[in-house]
C-alpha cells in the first residue's frame, strides 16, 4: 500500500493506525434503500485504506492518492456547507460525529483506494474509514449501527445525496462468504452463509472507464420521481400522508400501486415498477442463496439490471453495453450495474473456472465498441470479504 509510504514522506514519522473499509456490491436490491426497501449485498476484498495519526491541536488534515490537494479544517470550525470537493464527505462526517460526541483531538492521514472510483460505494467507504479513525484518536467507541447512521447522515445532510443505508450497512456488517440480507426499514439483517452445495463463485468488476459521481448525476431526480409517484398513490387511495419527503414506497402496499398505477405519469410509474419488483426480487434472491442456488440468484441479478435500464432509466450507453455483453457471456451467473448506475462499473458473479475467458471476451467486445476507453477500462476479479477493520 502506498498510503503508508506517503504518510511517512509527508509527516516524517510512521502512522499510528491503519484502517480499511471494503467496497461493496449489491447484486439485487438497487434503487430501493432510500424508500426503506430490502437489499442483498456483499463486501469485496478491495476498498479504502487510511494511514493516520492523532493531531493534538484539533486540526484535521487529510490527503488522498486519488485526488489533488490536501484538505484541512479544525474540529471546532468545520465549514457549515459543502465546498464541492472530495473532502466534503469527511467534513460532513466530522460534523456528524461532533454532534454526538465531544471531539478534542484532530487527525492527519492519507487515503488510498484500491480500485477506480465508480459504482462500488467508495464515498461511503471513505466516510466510514475516516469516521472510525477520528473516533479512535478521540477515545470514542462507535457501535456498528451508530457508525452506519453517522456515515449516512454525512452523505445525506451535508453532501446532499438522497441515499439510503445500503452502502454503509454492507461495508460495516458484511462477512466473507455470507450474503447480507438487510431490511432498511428497521435495520434488521441476516448474514446468510454460503451453502455447502453452492457452486463456487468470484466477483468480477468491469470498470467502464467513466468516472462516477452521485452528487453530479440524476440520482436525486430518480429518487424524487419515485417519491412523487408514491405521494400520488397515497392521494389516489385516500391514505393519510404528510410532507413530500416523508413519502416512502414501503408504506404503500403493492395492491395500491396496481390499482392506481395507470393514473401516474409514465416516469413516475416506471420508478414505482422498479421499486416494487425489486423488493420481490430481493426476497426471492435471499431464499435462492439460502438453498445454494446461485443460478437463480444470478438470474434475478440480471433481471435487476434490466429493470434498472428500462424502469429506473439509469446507465450510460457504455454501462448498458457492458451489461448486454455480460448477459451473453458463458460463465457469468448474473450481474448488473454497481452503485446507482450513473457511469462507473458493472459487477458480475462468475464461475471461477471461466474467469480468464470472461475477462478476455468481455474486454474484447466492449473495447470493440468503445476503443477510446482502452486506457481507462479495467477488469478486476475479487472475493467476498469481511466489513470494516482496524
Image (cartoon, rainbow, N blue to C red):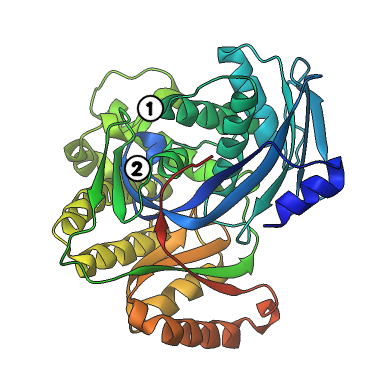
Disc 1 to disc 2, how far (Cα)? 15 Å
Q: Horizontally, is 68 left or right of 115 in the view?
A: right
Q: Does 200 sit above or below residue 192?
A: below
Q: Residues within 10 Å of mark 2 (few under 14, many from 20)?
A: some
Q: Residue at x 23, y 66 (%)?
A: 294
* Residue under label 2: 264
* Residue under label 1: 247
Q: Nearer the viewer, mark 1 or mark 2?
A: 1
Q: Does 65 sit above or below residue 129?
A: below
Front residue (pair 241, 215): 215
Q: Are marks 1 and 2 in contact (CB under 8 Å)?
A: no
Q: Residue at x 78, y 20 (%)?
A: 56
Element at label 2 = loop
Taking the image as drawn, is residue 329 in sight? no
Q: Earlier in the sequence, mark 1 or mark 2?
A: 1
Residue 114 position within the rendered picture, expressed as x and y whole percent measured from the top left: 61, 59
Amino acid at each position: 500500500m502506498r498510503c503508508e509510504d506517503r504518510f511517512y514522506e509527508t509527516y516524517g514519522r510512521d502512522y499510528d493506525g491503519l484502517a480499511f473499509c471494503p467496497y461493496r456490491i449489491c447484486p439485487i436490491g438497487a434503487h430501493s434503500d432510500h424508500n426503506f426497501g430490502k437489499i442483498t449485498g456483499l463486501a469485496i476484498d478491495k476498498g479504502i485504506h487510511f494511514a493516520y495519526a492523532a493531531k493534538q491541536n484539533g486540526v484535521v488534515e487529510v490527503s488522498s492518492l486519488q485526488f489533488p490537494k490536501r484538505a484541512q479544517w479544525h474540529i471546532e470550525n468545520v465549514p457549515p456547507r459543502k465546498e464541492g470537493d472530495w473532502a466534503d464527505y469527511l467534513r460532513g462526517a466530522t460534523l456528524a460525529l461532533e454532534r454526538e460526541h465531544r471531539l478534542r483531538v484532530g487527525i492527519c492521514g492519507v487515503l488510498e483506494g484500491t480500485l477506480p472510483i465508480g459504482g462500488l460505494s467508495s464515498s461511503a467507504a471513505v466516510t466510514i474509514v475516516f469516521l472510525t479513525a477520528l473516533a479512535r484518536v478521540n477515545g470514542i467507541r462507535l457501535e456498528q449501527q451508530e457508525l452506519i447512521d453517522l456515515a449516512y447522515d454525512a452523505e445525506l445532510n451535508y453532501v446532499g445525496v438522497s441515499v439510503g443505508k445500503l452502502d454503509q450497512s454492507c461495508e460495516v456488517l458484511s462477512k466473507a462468504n455470507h450474503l447480507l440480507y438487510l431490511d432498511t426499514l428497521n435495520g434488521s439483517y441476516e448474514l446468510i452463509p454460503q451453502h455447502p452445495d453452492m457452486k463456487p463463485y468470484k466477483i468480477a468488476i468491469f470498470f467502464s472507464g467513466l468516472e462516477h459521481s452521485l452528487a453530479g448525476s440524476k440520482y436525486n431526480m430518480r429518487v424524487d420521481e419515485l417519491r412523487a409517484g408514491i405521494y400520488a398513490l397515497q392521494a389516489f387511495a385516500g391514505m393519510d400522508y404528510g410532507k413530500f419527503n416523508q413519502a416512502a414506497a414501503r408504506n404503500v402496499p403493492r395492491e395500491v400501486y396496481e390499482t392506481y398505477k395507470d393514473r401516474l405519469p409514465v416516469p413516475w410509474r416506471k420508478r414505482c415498477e422498479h421499486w416494487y419488483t425489486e423488493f420481490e426480487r430481493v426476497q426471492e434472491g435471499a431464499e435462492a442463496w439460502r438453498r445454494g442456488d446461485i443460478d437463480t440468484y444470478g438470474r434475478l441479478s440480471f433481471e435487476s439490471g434490466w429493470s434498472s435500464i428500462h424502469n429506473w432509466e439509469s446507465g450510460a450507453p457504455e454501462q448498458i453495453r457492458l451489461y448486454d455483453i455480460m448477459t451473453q457471456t458463458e460463465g457469468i451467473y448474473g450481474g448488473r450495474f454497481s452503485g446507482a448506475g450513473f457511469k462507473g462499473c458493472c459487477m458480475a458473479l462468475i464461475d471461477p473456472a471461466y474467469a480468464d475467458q470472461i475477462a478476455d471476451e468481455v474486454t474484447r467486445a466492449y473495447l470493440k465498441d468503445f476503443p477510446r476507453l482502452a486506457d481507462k477500462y479495467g477488469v478486476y476479479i475479487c472475493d467476498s470479504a469481511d466489513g470494516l477493520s482496524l
